[in-house]
Image: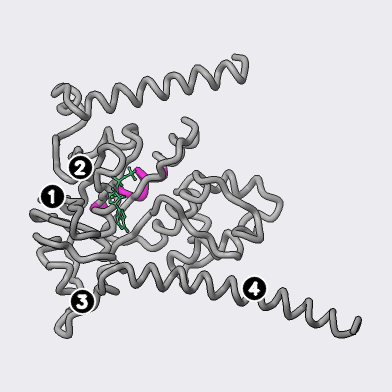
Amino acid sequence: LMQLSIPLNFFGSMHREIKQGLVDLEAMFSLMREAPEVTDKPTAAKLAVDGGSVRFDNVLFHYDEERPILKGVSFEVPAGKTVAIVGPSGAGKSTISRLLFRFYDVSGGAITVDGQDIRDVQQLSLRQNIGMVPQDTVLFNDTLLYNIGYGRPSASREEIEDAARMAQISEFVKSLPNGFDTEVGERGLKLSGGEKQRVAIARTILKAPPILVLDEATSALDSHTEQEIQTALDQVSQNRTTLVIAHRLSTVIGADEIIVLEAGKIKERGRHADLLAQGGLYASMWDRQREASEAEERLRKAVEGD
Ligand code: ATP
């Protein structure tokens, strides 16, 4: 009996692992079931990108029939320009980035890229042309080199290191005993939200897509990290059509247009200075955020004792 209990334990733990694997798969499939089927039309052609201008034309969208989320949203990101979407929590900002990636189809209106309705093109070609820096990046249980290089599997080590430098993460990498060969992920070194985001930016620099979607992390970052990330984002968005889903206003000051979304409708739009001058929703969000970050800074100074 003693002899038997060892293999049984072994199978017990293996069984647990398999079960966990199945649970993860199940979660994935239920997520896929939740999304209405988005498939290529038989006639779908490859997306032909020339500059990569993005247009939302009177876009309506709901996840559930009873609850409209986007209620007629129209805007354009001209080729090479940057448009930022801001607004209160739940306004529908991240939904806009999901629709551009065609995780879901619009319920009304249309989204076009260089004049092509994204429902008429092959999804793979759409996604190949859009670089997404998500709110929370998933890391593989592998080295940092692998995790960054994933953006373009054919990239050389030198190209990966260059991308890391542009993404402002090489100083951090240098501080690790094994540098780029450090194992990260669930079983390796855990990275902070800001570090993970810079890994995602480095990946995107390697992928070099004509269109970029930055879905900013909601979590508060300290002002130094925020500055580093901003520098990295400025690098990657240069001369690329960029849509920024902004949760912090400090990242949108330089945008060519800022769209203020509230409850699925565009409430205000314009450049930073114009919106401040209007004294509306944007201006009050700006004031609130500035007060919060000033308070945070005072707290930090008090803790550090300087
Ligand atoms: P935040 O700033 O808090 O991230 P947001 O403006 O990005 O908010 P969205 O994530 O676009 O907001 O969500 C808009 C609304 O859609 C929310 O009320 C949310 O509850 C709802 N929603 C988001 N995803 C789903 C989903 N998969 N199924 C049903 N409702 C959803």
* Place of residue 101 in the rendered image (x, y in percent of width and height, measured from the top left): 27, 63
Q: Residue furthest right?
A: 2
Quarter in which the N terminus is drawn: bottom right
Question: Does 230 sit left or right of 119 as displayed?
Answer: right
Residue at label 3?
46
The tag on residue 22 is none
Residue at label 1?
71
**Cα distance, mark 2 to mark 1?**
8 Å
**Cα distance, mark 1 to mark 3?**
29 Å
Q: Nearer the viewer, residue 76 or 16?
A: 16
Question: Does 269 sit left or right of 211 as displayed?
Answer: left
- Name which residue type carries label 4: Glu
The tag on residue 17 is 4
Tags 4 and 3 touching, CB below 8 Å: no
At label 4, counting other C-alpha atoms closer than 10 Å, the crowd grade (few under 14, some 14-19, many 20 or more) is few
Tags 1 and 3 touching, CB below 8 Å: no
* Place of residue 25 in the rendered image (x, y in percent of width and height, measured from the top left): 49, 73
> Which residues lie in the magenta part?
232-241
